[in-house]
Image (cartoon, grey):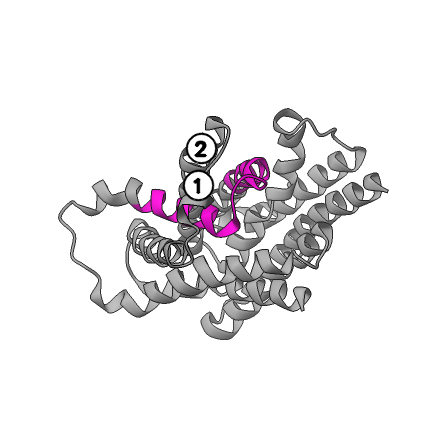
Amino acid sequence: MGYLKIIAAILLWSSLGIFIRKIGIPNEEIVFYSSAIAGFLQLSLLTLTGRLRVSFKSDTGSYKLFIFVLLPVFSLVNVLLFYYAFTHTTIANAVLTHYTAPVFVALTAPLFLKEKTLKATWTAITLSSLGLWLILGSPSPHEWTSLNESERNGIIAGASSGLAYAFIILVVRKIALHYSSLAVICAQNSVIALLLLPVMLQDRVFPAHAIPYLAVLGVVHSTMAPILYVQGFRSVKANEGAILGYLEPVGAIILALVFLNEAPGAYALIGGSLILLSGYLILRSKTGDRR
């Protein structure tokens, strides 16, 4: 059952690009309204279950810095860059470049988590860099110049969102033992909504036509999927769940092909495969090291 919950969450997340394309409003508005909806829903759940006060208790004040400052800021940067990538390049390129995150984690974990860097890490970095280069333009100078500036910016934003997501992983690892998953998600969405509130108070028209999409993003992508994902890990090993996570790019590419008629090119498929392979090598090496 745990595997099915994780796969269900991943498949829900893989549809994110479709909603971003269809919603038709600025990215900051998407983030604000979906985060506000999710934060309100999660805060209500914590209140109704009587877990609100207990959830945010911590013996160490520094952990509050992680949950109320670092995690929301990194999450906001991650989602804005990721949404930008969705609207400036293909969904395949946006998702595949975002999945450089495991490589960034391998590079930063020794500094922040005191984890040693394995030899396989450098192989993974090489493969990921080559994969990103193939997606950006391929070996052919003519095909390299065929990408316009908007598409290149979208791909760069996708890779940058992967870096931000890597820092999210590091922060979550720091606070995982001190807060419940629902509390972490609630704090993240609530603070993001507050950070964007000054922007939203400017002269903006409420996007009434986008309410159904925003409701789905808030309820499904920002609440249901994370809860399913966390529940799945109660019976699934961490490395197994992480490997299942690589179903998301596959799902995103299939959905983009079906709903948006976006067929990834040969070099994009090869480059994306190398990026995914690099992440798998890191996960496998960590598993082997534990043995």
Please say whether residue 152 is one of the residues in the magenta stretch: no
Q: Report the predominant secondary structure element of the magenta stretch.
A: helix
The answer to whether residue 168 is magenta is: yes
Q: At label 1, which amino acid type do we have? A: Phe
Instruction: Identify the residue under disc 1.
Output: 56
Please tell me in which quadrant of the rendered image residue 214 appears.
Answer: bottom left
Residue 152 visible: no
The image quadrant of residue 246 is bottom right
Q: Which of 42 and 167 is in front in this view?
A: 42
Which residue is located at x 63 percent, y 25 percent?
111
How many residues crowd mark 1 within 10 Å: few (<14), some (14–19), many (20+)?
some
**Secondary-structure class at tag 2:** helix
Q: Name the secondary structure under disc 1.
A: loop
| x, y percent for residue 289 | 83, 39
Q: Residue 84 carries which label?
A: none
Q: Residue at x 16, y 52 (%)?
A: 204
Q: Residue lying furthest left in this view?
A: 203
Residue 64, numbered label: 2
Give, as a three-letter code, the residue at label 2: Lys
Residue situated furthest right in the rendering? 291
Alpha-carbon span between mark 1 and mark 2: 8 Å
Residue 193 horizontal side relative to residue 9, left or right:
left
| Quadrant of residue 33 within the rendered picture | bottom left
Q: Which of 87 and 238 is in front in this view?
A: 238
Residues in magenta, as a range: 164-193
